[in-house]
Amino acid sequence: MSAVTALETDLSATMLELGRKARAAADTLAFAEPEKKTAALVAAADALDTRRDDLLSANALDMQAAETKGISKAFLDRLKLTDQRIDAMIEGLRTIAALPDPVGAVMAEWTRPNGLVMSRVRTPLGVIGVIFESRPNVTADAGALTLKSGNAVILRGGSDSVNSSRAIHACLVEGLKSAGLPEHAIQIVPTTDRAAVGEMLQGLGGTIDVIVPRGGKTLVARVEAEARVPVFAHLEGICHTYIDASADRDMAVAVTLNAKMRRTGICGATETLLVHGDAVDTHLKPVIAALIDKGCEIRGDARVQSMIPEAVAATEEDWRTEYEDSIISVKVVEDVGAAIAHIGKYSSHHTEAIIAEDPKAVARFFNEVDSAILMHNVSTQFADGGEFGFGGEIGIATGKFHARGPVGVEQLCTFKYLVRGTGQTRP
Amino acid sequence: MSAVTALETDLSATMLELGRKARAAADTLAFAEPEKKTAALVAAADALDTRRDDLLSANALDMQAAETKGISKAFLDRLKLTDQRIDAMIEGLRTIAALPDPVGAVMAEWTRPNGLVMSRVRTPLGVIGVIFESRPNVTADAGALTLKSGNAVILRGGSDSVNSSRAIHACLVEGLKSAGLPEHAIQIVPTTDRAAVGEMLQGLGGTIDVIVPRGGKTLVARVEAEARVPVFAHLEGICHTYIDASADRDMAVAVTLNAKMRRTGICGATETLLVHGDAVDTHLKPVIAALIDKGCEIRGDARVQSMIPEAVAATEEDWRTEYEDSIISVKVVEDVGAAIAHIGKYSSHHTEAIIAEDPKAVARFFNEVDSAILMHNVSTQFADGGEFGFGGEIGIATGKFHARGPVGVEQLCTFKYLVRGTGQTRP
């Protein structure tokens, strides 16, 4: 056996063992008392607080390595841990701990004319594989949400955040142990070898029930090509804001500015602005002035360019690009129908907003656009499980199956039907 | 180009064209007035009634060919159309027509502290590919359910039912046309070439959103290996009935007899009977006597064999077999825990029933068995969308994702979130 083959075999064996342990943990977790899961999450939050210095020094190692590699500003922003972001993680864990337990919840109950009492109750999915970019907080969020929903999880974060992820993971394991839950309920892949992702996509010998990929085009394309298990697709967020001629001008300025610039690196950030042809002078000019004032680069169609000297020409590629940066593509459209057609062609089916006062335009937009989240007179940056009241999210699913939109604890569950009878036989 | 390659190219082109037409129909259907969908279904039901003789003579051709091939009795039973079964199809279409329209239904609505009003509304999935065995009524059921749920469908039935399916399909198209809906909303694959299934599993150039396979092990194995689009898994139904020591004896006899023998060819028929060790003399003996009296073959473990002279020895393969015939495998187990373990190992996660008066045994069974449908003191033959009040079903999904259990019009939909604001920006 060559050295390479031996290494591959080692990786395969390591990953299969990870899967086997996750499956065993999932079998226990499915019937774990809700109080234990809550206690584990509260203890993990406490551990994050206590080990704050460990987290910051682990993250400093990651940041240093990333800066040396000359990685983009948007990427570094996502990678960085601060005291404030650790506070947010702790708060996130406590919020998830306080959520009602989803497992066993009765989603619906009805009685049939023959006396059969039927109910649909929530049950865990089993073992979830999460593949994500170098964003350390996902380790805490994904670990907490899968635990609360009674699932075991195998986390594979970006290699650039490996030290931060391991430090956070240690706190989660401390929580599990202190609550008497299996420590393999939350595991991280112990290697940065990219081949580990391939092993996960094969399902680790049938132990992984679903893969949740969070990341850019390259990752999603790979997952789509290789996955042999179900996938909750988390495509990029090519989100649109459309300003109708009927929009309130001040609202259009404030909402668009927030939708693009509040935090450019999140998937709910608006990447393309569409504006009704009759709103160019009234709405588009002040919106663009505000964006430029905040340091945003404008890439526009011919009409935008003719009006805004600073605007660069938008190429076909621009309409398909998630910038995750202070850049926006801008197009003037004939009406709401043309905006819907543009979105249908270029959107990643994540989140789209309409700013309008005309109820007909809003109704048409809500009816005809087929994306996970549609918004009216709201910043697209509200596309977030926490903002939806889900107590956090593992990501925003852009596929149509099972989970769509923010994936919280309920979306990480499936259900079963319980039928209660008194001896009925079918005629 | 060789003749074979030319044929393959022709098939590919034909199938892609089918997909293209389905997609165009789906885009129209998604916004079709509910009244039009209802009118199309009622007209299709009328057409089935009017063309009754066409249906019976088409089916006679299929039956003749199948009998010549020496196909099993269970298979012939599924293939056969009678006046009574045509009545049932007509009744099915009228029931589905009368269901509330699922598209646009508000599944949940809530308001956030910042004033955002959120709702989750049902939307169609798009284009559904249904691959099924030679059971003519599926053409009517699947066509009607997908239409009601605003989806286009491509139906590929077993080649042995091709004449029956075409005759039924003609009635559905008549309904669509009379209601002014696109006739390509419901299409059947125009060839019995098995390669057409392969083309569907590749997604027909991205036009198919989901595949619903209904059939035996061979079909499901092929779908799992080849599908490049999401699948609502419809595995076989290896359903179990467990008789606890606490069961009412007469109920155990009546329910088990019905669960196995009412109709042996349906997926909700019980294939394996598990009996508590303390209930052998009291319950198992009369149950088996009743089964034998109805002509059922018994395949039992050692304990069953020692008691019942007619019992054949059950092999490991028997516990994994969906007989779809008058055969039952029978095992004596130590207690409800052992029954749950057997089900966990051999079940296809379709439907399992417990006959018991002890609430603890029932609670444990309901909690620990992970199948789509669990029943208490009921015949497993109630595992059916119509019996659940869904107005029909396209099948019983045995996977954990999106649709689980009976797949009716609601399960053929996805949803989107609508967020209504008044200019909120995210802090």
Image: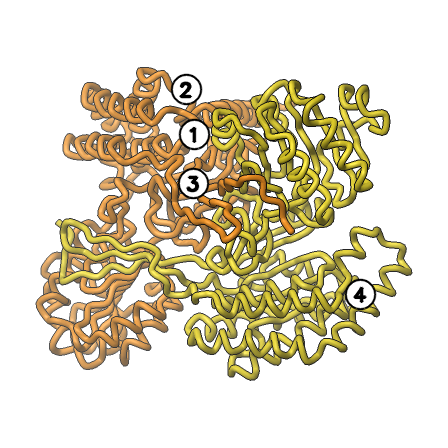
Chain colours: A yellow, B orange
**Which percent across, then down, holds residue B118?**
47, 45
Which circle marks residue B411 in the picture?
A: none
Dot 4 lies on which element? Answer: helix
Crowding near pointer 4: few (<14 within 10 Å), some, many (20+)? few
Please identify, in this view, whether the residue under mark 2 or under mark 4 is nearer the observer. 2
Circles 1 and 3 on the same subunit: yes
Question: What amino acid is at disc 4?
Answer: Val
Residue pointed to by mark 1: B152
Tell me the CA gap for discs 1 and 3.
19 Å
Given residues A59 and B162, the one toward you in this image is A59
Dot 1 lies on which element? Answer: strand
**Which percent across, then down, holds residue B151?**
42, 32
Question: What amino acid is at disc 3?
Answer: Val
Residue pointed to by mark 2: B182
Tell me the CA gap for discs 2 and 4.
57 Å
Choose the circle earlier in sequence order: 1 or 2. Answer: 1
Apparent side of residue A140 relative to residue A181 in the rendered image (left or right): right
Output the chain of dot 1: B
Given residues A156 and A94, the one toward you in this image is A94
| Contact, mark 1 vs mark 2 (Cβ under 8 Å) | yes
Crowding near pointer 3: few (<14 within 10 Å), some, many (20+)? some
Tell me the CA gap for discs 2 and 3.
24 Å
